[in-house]
Amino acid sequence: MPYTDLPVGHPATHGAELPPEPADFDAFWAGTLRRSRAFGGAPVLTPVTDTGLVTVDVYDVRFPGWDGRPVAGWLVVPSEAEGPSPTVVTYVGYGGGRGLPTDHLLYASAGYAHLVVDSRGQGDDTPDVYEGTGTQWVHGFMTRGIEDPHDHYYRRLITDCVRAVDAARLLPHVDAARIVVQGASQGGGLALAVAGLAGRAVAAVLSDVPFLCHMRRGAETATEGPYTELVAHLRHRPRQDPDRVFATLGYFDGVHFARRATAPALFSAGLMDPVCPPSTVLAAYERYAGDKTLRQWPFGDHGGGRGATAAEHLRWLCERDLAPRAPRPV
């Protein structure tokens, strides 16, 4: 896989035109979250006893998300945990859901409580109730409700993700002062959105090869993945104004959330990433308002650092006093 974009740090990437920020961005999100929080509700935990796992306990979680509708998740906690633990809230990559509890053993094995959030309409356990017309999203979730930000799919999904942090703070297993939001690709973009919207409720951010950042540049440079849905949508609708499409997406762009996020953050970028080109990651990273670190993988594709990423996460969290106990060397 050759470079599909200029490498992170190349002087030319600094001149890439940034997406314009909607004038009512803050009001849009304040109203959106107020609307869903008004429905109230508390998370419901149900023990899962047939996993075959002996060092962790697993719970099925249902919590109120968009418009108070239930969102599924897994809570995986160390069986030996005593009292509230530092907690990782994970958001999932594009096209995936919460999967199986056995897919999510890393953080609980390191002593964290771990809440894995299902993605509405993408996973199997949280439907996306959508009232728009099918013609608006024939090319995927990126164009579902593209005519109006109030109807767009990511308004609902990002709301679910913020409400997941609200729910986590109510769980007895969770140290509410030490909640880390984490994800890769779509999950990395969602982690940035939550960091920008949830404020001090987030103690740290792990955002790997994040999607949903500088989406216009993503559409112009990505050769694989969800950004190509936007290309297909506009290619088959040559009379539709691209500026209007990207104006809608501006309400969900990680560049704007990054400007509002202050928790320490660890970003990563694969410099041969054809799905989330590194200049899109850099656009959000450079504008991130909190303490930040960027891990570059020079020959990484959309898998970034692959298995090495886990060790990077655990080490970085330990350095910021967010480890549940004195860890073994990694």
Image (spheres, helix red, strand yellow):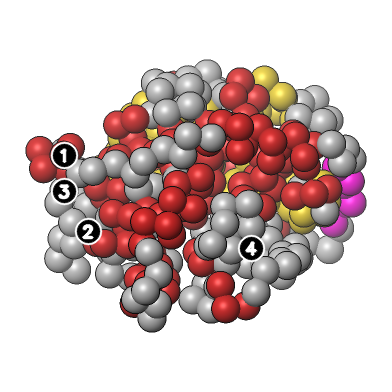
Answer with the quarter of the image where residue 114 lies: top right
Which numbered marker is on residue 97? 4
Labels 1 & 2 near each other (Cβ < 8 A): no
Nearest to N terminus: mark 3 or mark 2? 3
Q: Is residue 289 magenta?
A: no
User: Horizontal and vertical percent for residue 299?
Assistant: 20, 56
Q: Which residue is mark 1?
A: 15
Q: Residue at x 48, y 22 (%)?
A: 262
Q: Are marks 3 and 4 in contact (CB under 8 Å)?
A: no
Q: CA distance from mark 1 to mark 3?
A: 13 Å
The residues bearing labels 3 and 4 have C-alpha atoms spaced at a distance of: 31 Å
Q: Residues within 10 Å of mark 2 (few under 14, many from 20)?
A: many
The three-letter amino acid code for the residue at tag 4 is Gly
Q: Quadrant of the N terminus?
A: bottom left
Q: Give the numbered dot on residue 7.
A: 3
Specify few, some or many for label 4: CA neighbours under 10 Å numbering under 14, 14-19, or 20 or more: many
Q: Looking at numbered disc 3 in the image, what kind of residue is underneath it? A: Pro
* SS at circle 2: loop
Q: Of residues 269 and 38, which is closer to you in this image? A: 38
Which residues lie in the magenta part? 42-48
Give the mark, 2 or 4, whose residue is nearer the N terminus.
Answer: 4
From the viewer's perspective, is the residue at label 1 or at label 2 nearer?
1
In the image, what residue occupies the spot 82% across and 54% down?
A: 70
Q: What is the x, y in percent for residue 315?
A: 43, 31
